[in-house]
């Protein structure tokens, strides 16, 4: 569902199934962060019989990626 947040290149959109993210940069630092939802893909996820499993797995991966990126 979520994009791979460990490999985000500046000014490039990283796509997941239902969510995208982009780190905007104008040089040395970040100038903004953008997270977007793809509504039709999110609706597709909600309708899937494996939603609970997939959502929990995606959240676990996101939490682990967040913990790793803080180190």
Image: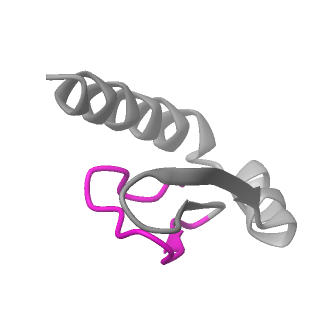
The part of the chain drawn in magenta is 1-17
Residue 43 percent across, percent down from the top left: 83, 59
- The mark total stands at 0
Residue 2 percent across, percent down from the top left: 51, 52
Residue 48 percent across, percent down from the top left: 68, 55
Q: Is residue 31 left or right of residue 27?
A: right
Residue 23 percent across, percent down from the top left: 52, 59
Residue 60 falls in which quadrant of the image?
Answer: top left
Q: Which residue is pictured at 77% across the width and 58% down the height?
A: 37
Whether residue 17 is situated above or below residue 64 in the rendered picture: below
Which residue is more in the foreground, 69 or 64? 69
Of the 4 image quadrants, the one containing the N terminus is: bottom right
Q: Main secondary structure of the magenta part?
A: loop
Q: Which residue is pictured at 59% across the width and 53% down the height?
A: 31
Whether residue 17 is situated above or below residue 71 in the rendered picture: below
Q: Which residue is pictured at 54% across the width and 37% down the height?
A: 55
Q: Which residue is pictured at 58% across the width and 33% down the height?
A: 52
Judging from the image, the colouring scheme is one colour
Which residue is more in the foreground, 59 or 49? 59
Whether residue 56 is situated above or below residue 48 in the rendered picture: above
Residue 65 falls in which quadrant of the image?
Answer: top left
Residue 29 drawn in magenta: no
Whether residue 17 is situated above or below residue 35 in the rendered picture: below
Q: Is residue 7 left or right of residue 17?
A: left
Q: Is residue 70 left or right of residue 50?
A: left
């Amino acid at each position: 569902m979520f994009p791979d947040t460990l490999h985000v290149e500046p000014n490039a959109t990283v796509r997941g199934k239902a969510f995208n993210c982009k780190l905007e940069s104008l040089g040395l630092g970040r100038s903004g962060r953008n997270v977007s939802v793809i509504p039709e893909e999110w609706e597709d996820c909600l309708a899937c019989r494996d939603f609970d499993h997939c959502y929990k797995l995606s959240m676990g991966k996101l939490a682990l990626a967040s913990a790793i990126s803080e180190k």
